[in-house]
């Protein structure tokens, strides 16, 4: 590859992944496209991730070729991604140098990587803020340029087995293909089109595309989650049939025992909508259970505010001590949601992509707690942060539902 532009292969997850130790949702695509790829290209290299290679066939052969032949490999270990850790091990066994490890700031080093340099970056919610992306791009670019200019042993395999020699690269005859981004059948392009369809409300098209992505990478729960979302939002052929189909799609994720807050949030949403359509209390009870689990695992405002609202819904149906218990718990959860939102607002809030929803959630929490002054202040801030008219419409509709519950 001496006459070609050098190449960097990136080992990492893609889509939105849950960081289970912290319960946070991290958007790995934001890391790749907004930070890694830009840093690599600024350093003068081609940048390739596995989903830019996967077609309908297997990824195994090209993945091993890239791990061996790439001039640089960057492994992002955030969320303890098993595939990235395995690919890092393969790279460390094959090559003594030019491997970079990165991870989100709250990643805790596994014991075997305790003496390995891991460069850190910070997520804000799902995304990475502009200033942090700019900072880490610069750090990563300089690190790439340095290890190419002055390669040092960075593999613990070659550090501790000092007489070991690297694999003979001359045995790999073919040059690595460089994706040019024009192939619409790679996993990356299919997911990109699926997300675009979802954002534009073309739910049946999004369902089809995320179904294709799931066939290409059956182990990736993110594609199942996106397909579930597209399916129930499509309301096709009817709202109830779409919801039941979406529920059947969740079954492979073992929703009854899942600790994934995204899966639990979707399960809660589907059961909640089945309750609204069919008015069978079993759906309501299950929706409350899923939102409750998702909230206590992730401690997030989305699951929390939905959990509190549905407790008030059930509190209108049950009687006696059960009614009192649901009403008391709903307000306790809202107080926790207020704390969560306030905490998010104290740290780089202006760089978050979900500013409106944090403020709207705070508005709903204060409304439910009947704290008038705080509610009006949060409402004003939310109105100023809204980017789309439908955002305020959605919030106002939710508040009207809550008002009816509290006044009944």
Image: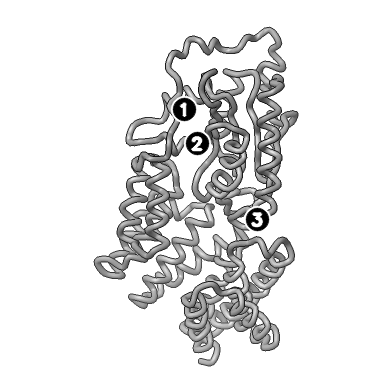
Q: Residues within 10 Å of mark 3 (few under 14, many from 20)?
A: many
Q: Earlier in the sequence, mark 1 or mark 2?
A: 2
| Residue holding disc 2 | 49
Residue 63's tag is 1
> From mark 2 to mark 3, how far is it between C-alphas?
22 Å
Q: Is residue 83 left or right of residue 378?
A: left
Residue 129's tag is 3
Measured as percent of width and height from the top left, residue 44 is found at: 59, 32
Measured as percent of width and height from the top left, residue 103 is found at: 65, 41
- Residue 106 visible to the viewer: no
> From mark 3 to mark 1, how far is it between C-alphas?
31 Å
Q: Earlier in the sequence, mark 2 or mark 3?
A: 2
Q: Residues within 10 Å of mark 1 (few under 14, many from 20)?
A: some
Q: Secondary structure at mark 2?
A: strand
Q: How many marks?
A: 3
Q: Is residue 269 left or right of residue 99?
A: left
Q: Secondary structure at mark 3?
A: loop
- Name the outermost residue toward the front: 3
CB contact under 8 Å: marks 2 and 3? no
CB contact under 8 Å: marks 1 and 2? no
Image vertical order of residue 64 relative to residue 303, above or below: above
- Residue 320 visible to the viewer: yes
Q: Residues within 10 Å of mark 2 (few under 14, many from 20)?
A: many
> From mark 1 to mark 2, how far is it between C-alphas?
9 Å
Most foreground residue, 295 or 230: 230
């Amino acid at each position: 590859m001496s006459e070609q532009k050098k190449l960097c292969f990136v080992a990492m997850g893609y889509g939105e992944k849950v960081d289970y130790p912290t319960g946070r949702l991290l958007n790995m695509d934001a890391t790749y496209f907004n930070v890694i790829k830009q840093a690599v290209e600024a350093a003068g290299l081609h940048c390739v991730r596995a989903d830019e290679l996967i077609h309908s066939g297997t990824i195994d052969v090209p993945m091993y070729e890239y791990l061996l032949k790439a001039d640089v490999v960057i492994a992002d270990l955030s969320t303890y991604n098993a595939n990235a850790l395995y690919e890092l091990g393969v790279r460390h066994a094959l090559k003594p140098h030019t491997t970079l490890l990165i991870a989100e700031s709250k990643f805790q080093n596994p014991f075997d990587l305790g003496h390995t340099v891991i460069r850190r970056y910070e997520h804000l919610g799902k995304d990475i803020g502009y200033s942090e992306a700019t900072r880490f791009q610069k750090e990563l670019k300089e690190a790439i340029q340095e290890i190419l200019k002055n390669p040092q042993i960075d593999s613990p395999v070659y550090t501790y087995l000092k007489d070991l020699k690297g694999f003979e690269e001359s045995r790999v005859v073919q040059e690595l293909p460089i994706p040019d981004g024009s192939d619409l059948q790679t996993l990356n392009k299919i997911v990109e089109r699926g997300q675009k369809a979802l954002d534009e409300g073309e739910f049946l098209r999004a369902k089809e595309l995320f179904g294709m992505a799931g066939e290409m990478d059956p182990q990736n729960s993110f594609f199942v989650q996106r397909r579930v979302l597209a399916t129930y939002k499509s309301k096709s052929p009817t709202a109830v049939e779409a919801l039941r189909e979406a529920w059947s799609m969740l079954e492979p994720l073992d929703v009854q025992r899942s600790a994934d807050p995204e899966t639990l949030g979707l399960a809660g949403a589907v059961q909640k909508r089945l309750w609204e359509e069919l008015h069978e209390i079993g759906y309501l009870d299950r929706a409350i259970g899923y939102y409750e689990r998702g909230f206590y695992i992730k401690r997030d405002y989305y699951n929390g505010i939905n959990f509190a609202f549905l407790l008030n819904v059930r509190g209108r149906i049950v009687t006696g001590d059960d009614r009192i218990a649901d009403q008391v718990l709903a307000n306790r959860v809202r107080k926790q949601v207020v704390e969560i939102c306030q905490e998010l607002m104290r740290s780089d809030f202006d760089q978050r992509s979900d500013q409106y929803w944090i403020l709207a959630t705070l508005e709903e929490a204060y409304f439910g707690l009947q704290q008038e002054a705080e509610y009006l202040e949060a409402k004003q801030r939310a109105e100023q942060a809204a980017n789309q008219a439908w955002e305020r419409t959605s919030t106002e509709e939710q508040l009207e539902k809550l008002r009816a519950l509290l006044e009944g």
